[in-house]
Amino acid sequence: MMSFSPKKKLENKVALITGGGSGIGRSTAKLFAREGATVIIMGRGKTRLTRVSRDILKSGGKALPVKGDVTDEQSVRQVIEVSLKELKKIDILVNSAGVAGEPLQVHEITDAMWAELIESNLTGTFRMIRAVLPCFLKKRKGTIVNLASIGGLVGLKNMAAYNAAKAGVIALTKSVAVEYGHLGIRCNCICPGTVKTSMTRDYLNYPGRYERISFTNPLKRISRPDEIARGILYLSSEESAFVTGTTLTIDGGYTAQ
C-alpha cells in the first residue's frame, strides 16, 4: 500500500524573517523550514543567527543567516541584495524584529527612549517592506506578515511608546494591503499577547508577575513562541490566499474581555 506525505505549506518558497535569531522569529524560521521554505534569518547577533541556521540545517531544512539591522537603511538594502544574489527571489517577508523597552509612565519617557521604540518597531518594519516591494512588484506576487501587538489595540499600562509603535504597524499593514493588493501582494499582521521569550524573561521573572499576567486572560496562561509562529504560517501560506489587511490576534482571549 502506497503512503503519501502531506504537501508542505511553503514548498519552494523563500522567506525572509527579521529578528530570526530569537523568540518568535526563531520559532517561525524553524517552522517555515519544516514546511519546505528556504529561510533567510536576519538579525543583529551573528552567534544567534548561526545557531538557528545550524539547527535548521541539521533537521534537513534550508537556511541562510544574514546579519542585518532594521534601524539602518544601508544594512536593510544589503540584506535584500545578498538574499537575492544567493537565492534569486524572496516570496515572503516576516517582520519580527522589535524591542519592548522599559515599562515607564508617559512623563518618564525621554525623547531618546521614544525614538528607539518607534525606530525599531515601526520604522524598521516600514524599511523592510519598502526594500522588498520592488522584488514583489516585479513578479506581481508576495506576502508580508508584520508582528504588531495587543499593545496596538489596547492601552497597555506603562508602555506608551511601544503601544504607539505597534498601533502604527497595524495602520501600516492596512495601508500596504490596500495599495498593493491589486498587484498580487498581501500584507497582514499578528497581534500577540504576552509571549515567553528572551525579551520578556526578566519582566516575567519579577515575583508574582507571571502568575498575575496569566490570570488576566481566559486561557489562564502565557503563550509560547511556537503558538504565534503557527499564526504567521497561516498568513504566509496559500491557506490565507484571500486574506489581506487583517489583524490576527493571538492573546488567549485577553482583548475579548
Image (cartoon, rainbow, N blue to C red):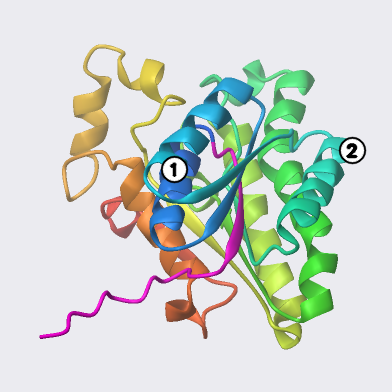
- Residue displayed at 78% across by 44% down: 79
User: What's the residue type where badge 1 is placed?
Assistant: Ile
- Element on which disc 2 rests: helix
User: What's the residue type where badge 2 is placed?
Assistant: Gln
What is the CA distance from the residue labelled 2 to the residue labelled 1? 28 Å
Q: Which residues are magenta?
A: 1-20
Count residues near mark 1 (Cα–Cα under 10 Å), then give few for <14, some for 14-19, many for 20+: many
Count residues near mark 2 (Cα–Cα under 10 Å), then give few for <14, some for 14-19, many for 20+: few
Q: Which mark is residue 156?
A: none
Q: Which residue is mark 2?
A: 74
Residue 149 as seen in the image, left or right of residue 214 = right
Q: Please provide percent x and percent y for residue 57.
A: 46, 42
Residue 28 as seen in the image, left or right of residue 73 = left
Please tell me whether the stretch drawn in magenta is mainly helix, strand or loop. Answer: loop
- Element on which disc 1 rests: helix
- Residue displayed at 67% across by 31% down: 117
Residue 130 as seen in the image, left or right of residue 213 = right
Q: Vertically, is 58 above or below 2?
A: above
Q: Which mark is residue 56?
A: 1
Query: In front here: 123 or 143?
Result: 143
